[in-house]
Amino acid sequence: MPTDRIFQAICGSGGATLWDGGMVVVDTVNLTDRTSFRGSGQNMHLVERFTRVDEDTLLYEYTIHDPESFSQDWAVSVPTKKNSSPIYEYACHEGNYGMTNLLAGAWNLGREQTGRD
C-alpha cells in the first residue's frame, strides 16, 4: 500500500525507520493540518537521526523540509551525555491539569526542606 495515502490522527512515519551505518534514521511524512511544528504546514518532511558518537554521547539531529512554510531547510543538532538519571518520555502537557498539582507539590516539598516560604 502506498504510504502517501496513509494518514493517522497527527502524523505517521511512513515505514522509513532504518539503520544507516551507525545511525538510526526516522523519516516522518503524512502530517495533517492539526499538526504545526515551529510554523510548519501539513506537507512538512521531518528527518531525525540518532547517532552513538561514543560510549557516553548520543547525538540527536533533525532536519525540517517544508518549502511552503520556510525559505530553506533547517536543522538542529543536540548532543546528549549519558547519566544515571531515569529517562522519561517527552510529551506535550497542554491541558494536563495534573501537572499543576505535581509542580505545586514539588515546590512545597522544596520549601519545607529549605525552611523558606
Image (cartoon, rainbow, N blue to C red):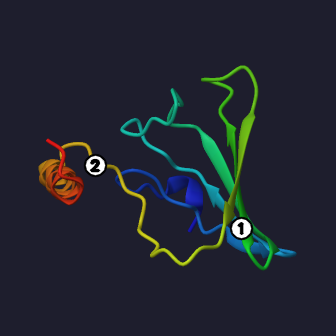
Q: Residue at x 34, y 53 (%)?
A: 9
Q: What element carries label 1?
A: strand
Q: Is mark 2 on a helix, strand or loop?
A: loop
Classify 10 Å Cα crowding around label 1: few (below 14), some (14-19), many (20 and above): some
How far across and down, in percent of the image, does residue 46 sit?
Answer: 63, 48
How far across and down, in percent of the image, does residue 38 sit?
Answer: 52, 31
Amino acid type at circle 2 is: His
**Marks 2, 1: nearer the viewer:** 1
Q: Taking 74 as reference, is 84 left or right?
A: left
Residue 58 is tagged as 1
Amino acid type at circle 1 is: Leu
Which residue is identified by label 2? Answer: 93
Between 109 and 37, the residue placed more toward the observer is 109
> Which quadrant of the figure contains the N terminus?
bottom right
Q: Taking 10 as reference, is 111 left or right?
A: left
Q: Taking 42 as reference, is 88 left or right?
A: left
